[in-house]
Amino acid sequence: MSKSYYRNSRAYYRNHAHEGDIPGLRLPRYAWEMLHEQGITTLDQLRAVADRLHKLPGIGTKTAQLIREELARATPPEAPPSDKE
């Protein structure tokens, strides 16, 4: 597929994303539906399956990548351990 198609599909996704069960995440409705069907309704549950989203029924590689990107955008990176006690 061409890069322009990929960019256009991302633009479509951004314009058709919705807030769902997990506050702060904006995903296409069908992604929310697939996550809900799998019982994934919390940020911790989503993080736990993030590396294997594409294996869940109804979620392909592109949707899995979009979900992972949105998860990274919406959640702050973990702070490095502090030496202070």
Image: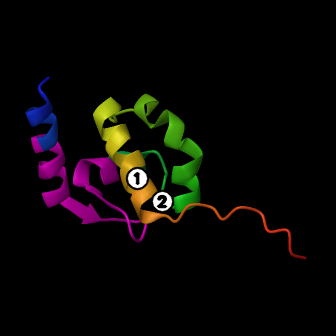
**Is residue 71 highlighted in magenta?**
no
Judging by the rendered image, the residue that carries numbered circle 2 is 41
Classed neighbour count for the residue bearing mark 2: other residues with Cα under 10 Å, few (<14), some (14–19), many (≥20): some
Q: Which quarter of the figure is the N terminus placed in?
A: top left
**Is residue 26 highlighted in magenta?**
yes
**What secondary structure is marked by label 2?**
loop
The amino acid sitting under disc 1 is His
* Figure check: 67 above or below 41: above
- Observer-nearest residue: 26 or 80? 80
Report the magenta residues as a range.
8-33
Q: Earlier in the sequence, mark 1 or mark 2?
A: 1
Q: What residue appears at the point 59 percent right and 58 percent down from the top-left corner?
A: 44
Which label is found at residue 36? 1
Q: What residue appears at the point 45 percent right and 29 percent down from the top-left corner?
A: 55
Classed neighbour count for the residue bearing mark 1: other residues with Cα under 10 Å, few (<14), some (14–19), many (≥20): some
State yes or no: discs 1 and 2 in contact (Cβ < 8 Å): yes
